[in-house]
Image: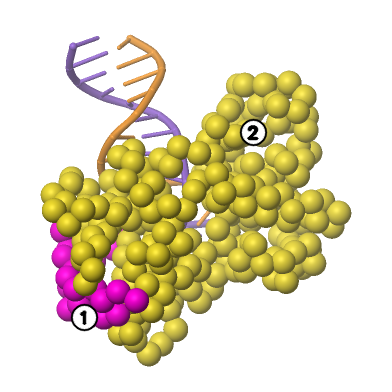
Chain colours: A yellow, B orange, C purple
DNA sequence: CGGGTTACCTGACGGC
DNA sequence: TGCCGTCAGGTAACCC
């Protein structure tokens, strides 16, 4: 998504900003249009699950929550039910932020102070110098919470949500409920590799073309066909055939193989 | 502070 | 057929 947005926005001037429905997870700030109109986009970046549209004025941050999408539409686009924000650029590009469940949000970063939402984030999972077994050994020490909860803790490592946590733990052969402190180093080496593989595969399978966002159901139609455990409770484990189990961990549904994951 | 739970929101889905 | 309850996800706000 970052790559798709960057291709459309980099170097463009945001000509018009329209708030269509201000209520998202957080209300869209009233001054957002006046701040962004006339701003030139420097680049579209990403940190954790946040998209960052850097401009020569302020930076627009957005989080897609669960169902949020940036949709590349034609300039005669008629506002849809869950359209919240519309951007028109100087070259006729139109982008719409749409989010049926309002779990996402858009906001401006402060002009002269660090972004509060980015302050306490853990390392990027695809950065081997920051996210590695040494790091996890250190962080998991004395942590008794289930390893899956900590893997999803954005202060420990960013970008891993419920689906990828379940998939990575299955591949690593680690039981999602296991207390993090009891996972041995050797298995953390494996976990780091599995997290990286799952994310890389998902990114590759998900495609990065902005036009994919236009699909009305918000699905990109990709990685769900390759899930080994997620949403497969009651079905046979792809490794051993054992019926996959469902548990609730940290309020999230968690599917795993009781035989392959220990 | 660590660990745990719940609210937020809408649409899809299953059961009756 | 149609109603209604349940569930899904990421994050913040709460609890003990």
Task: Decide whether the magenta segment is chiefly helix, strand or loop.
Answer: loop
A167 is higher (above) or lower (below) than A161: above
Question: Residue at 64% of width from left, 33% of height from top?
Answer: A228
Count neighbours of disc 1 (C-alpha within 10 A) and say few if under 14, some if 14 to 19, many if 20 or more. Answer: some
Residue A131 is at least partly visible in this image: yes
* Circle 1 or circle 2, nearest the eye: 1
Left or right, A211 with respect to A162, comes to left
Q: Which disc number belongs to residue A164?
A: none
Query: Where residue A153 sits in the image (x, y, percent)?
Result: 58, 59
Query: Where residue A205 sits in the image (x, y, percent)?
Result: 55, 44
Residue at the spot of label 2: A228
B15 is higher (above) or lower (below) than A261: above
Check the residue under mark 2 and report the chain it is in. Answer: A
Residue at the spot of label 1: A38
Left or right, A170 with respect to A23, comes to right
| Pointers 1 and 2 within a single chain | yes
> Residue B12 lies in what quarter of the image?
top left
> Residue A237 lies in what quarter of the image?
top right
For marks 1 and 2, the one nearer the N-term is 1
Question: Residue at 18% of width from left, 46% of height from top?
Answer: A80
Please, what secondary structure does the residue beneath circle 2 have?
loop
Query: Where residue A88 sits in the image (x, y, percent)?
Result: 21, 66
Count neighbours of disc 2 (C-alpha within 10 A) and say few if under 14, some if 14 to 19, many if 20 or more. Answer: many
Q: Which residues are magenta?
A: A11-40
**Quadrant occupied by the N terminus of chain A:** bottom left
Query: Where residue C15 sits in the image (x, y, percent)?
Result: 46, 57
Please, what secondary structure does the residue beneath circle 1 have?
loop
A251 is higher (above) or lower (below) than A238: below
Check the residue under mark 1 and report the chain it is in. Answer: A
């Amino acid at each position: 998504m970052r790559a798709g947005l960057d291709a459309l926005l980099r170097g463009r001037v945001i000509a018009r900003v329209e708030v269509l429905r201000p209520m998202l997870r957080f209300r869209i700030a009233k001054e957002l249009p006046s701040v962004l109109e006339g701003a030139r986009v420097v680049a579209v970046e990403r940190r954790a699950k946040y998209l960052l549209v850097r401009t020569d004025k302020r930076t627009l941050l957005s989080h897609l929550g669960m169902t949020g999408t940036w949709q590349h539409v034609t300039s005669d686009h008629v506002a849809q039910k869950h359209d919240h924000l519309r951007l028109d650029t100087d070259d006729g590009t139109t982008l719409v932020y749409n989010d049926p469940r309002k779990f996402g949000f858009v906001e401006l970063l402060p002009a002269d102070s660090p972004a509060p939402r980015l302050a306490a984030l853990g390392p990027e999972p695809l950065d081997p110098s920051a996210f590695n077994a040494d790091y996890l050994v250190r962080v998991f020490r004395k942590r008794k919470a289930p390893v899956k909860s900590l893997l999803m803790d954005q202060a420990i490592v960013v970008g891993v949500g419920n689906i990828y946590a379940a998939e990575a733990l299955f591949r690593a052969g680690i039981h999602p409920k296991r207390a993090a402190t009891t996972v041995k180093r050797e298995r953390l080496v494996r976990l780091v590799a599995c997290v990286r593989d799952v994310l890389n595969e998902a990114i590759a399978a998900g495609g990065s073309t902005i036009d994919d966002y236009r699909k009305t159901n918000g699905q990109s139609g990709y990685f769900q066909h390759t899930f080994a455990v997620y949403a497969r409770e009651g079905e046979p484990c792809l490794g051993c055939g054992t019926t996959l189990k469902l548990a609730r961990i940290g309020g999230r549904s968690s599917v795993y193989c009781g035989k392959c994951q220990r």
